[in-house]
Amino acid sequence: MPTLFQAQPDLMEFYRRQIVLGLRDFTCCCGFDKVVVGSSGGLDSALVLALAVEALGPENVIAVTLPSRFSSMGSVRDSVALCRNLGIKLFEHPIRDLVTTYEQGFNAAFGEPLRGLALENMQARARGTVLMEYANQFGALLLTTGNKSEISVGYCTLYGDTNGGLGPIGDLYKTEVFALSRHINETAGRELIPKAIIDKPPSAELAPGQKDSDSLPPYPILDAILKTLIEGERLRTEERDEIKAAWDELTGTKDGEALVARVRQMIWKSEFKRRQSAPILYLRQPPFGSGQPLPIAAGYEHFNKKTP
């Protein structure tokens, strides 16, 4: 299994130009001069900020870091370094007290402490609310930062990190997010996106020591499955050959087959989230969004359909 699919530099440049053009056009047509992005210290938000700066100029891009009690100091520090590199203003709005107030209110009303997934999602929704407050108060467009890998399997919080008016990287798989981030640095000849952000293990930081790999297979494996299930024959020839090798390796074992079935089920079960999320900039033939054939509610038989 490859550790990271090798995306061609010219393809990454094509994606970069598409996203920059789309961002510029969307904000102009919708009457926005500025955009705001929640800067988590992670790679997705870093890439969105870098692309927004190229599209609109640093003076029209605002970043907000919203640390919780689970946020690492490294994440805040990485956000500071990123925004310094990009020449944009960074605001800090901690959500610790907000979340504590919600926890206390929930316990008082329902006689049970807020915990587990409910507590994790509350933090994402607190961040989303603050970012929408900023957008409304200052007339900025909030950009969401979800990638296609997360959106496909529903690894996102409805009314939380899905808040916003546009998803610039919603058609980039996570492995492509890595590749495009590296391409941007190589093109610039310096670290616009700090290497520390690119190299750190992806994490939502909604629980102690949380990593994306706790809930999802490693992104190279996940993306091989998703590209086969979603893109199929629409993949470029060389990419299709590479994905086929990974797919054959996966489906050659019972554990691999079970993983493919699990991912297929996650795709189907997450359609209701995609229908309520921000529109994305399409980089390929759109399989999700308007015209998408997946029903919002699907029966179990759909999950077990054979791969096309």
Image: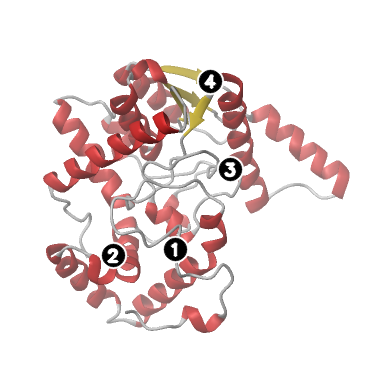
Of pointers 4 and 1, the one earlier in the residue sequence: 4
Q: Report the residue marked by disc 3.
A: 160
Of pointers 1 and 3, the one earlier in the residue sequence: 3
- Colour scheme shown: secondary structure
Secondary structure of the residue carrying numbered label 1? loop
Q: Are marks 2 and 3 in contact (CB under 8 Å)?
A: no
Q: Nearer the viewer, mark 4 or mark 1?
A: 1
**Dot 3 surroundings within 10 Å: few (below 14), some, or many (20 or more)?**
many
Q: Quadrant of residue 131?
A: top right
**Residue type marked 2:** Ala
Rounded to the nearest angstrom, the CA distance separating label 2 from label 3 is 27 Å
Q: Report the residue marked by disc 4.
A: 92
Of pointers 4 and 3, the one earlier in the residue sequence: 4
Q: Is residue 114 above or below residue 250?
A: above
Of pointers 2 and 3, the one earlier in the residue sequence: 3
Horizontal relation, residue 287 to residue 265: left or right: left
Q: Percent from the top left, x then y, of residue 23?
A: 35, 35
**Residue type marked 4:** Glu
**Residue type marked 1:** Gly
Q: Report the residue marked by disc 1.
A: 291
**Dot 2 surroundings within 10 Å: few (below 14), some, or many (20 or more)?**
many
Secondary structure of the residue carrying numbered label 3? loop
**Dot 4 surroundings within 10 Å: few (below 14), some, or many (20 or more)?**
some
Rounded to the nearest angstrom, the CA distance separating label 2 from label 4 is 37 Å
Secondary structure of the residue carrying numbered label 4? strand
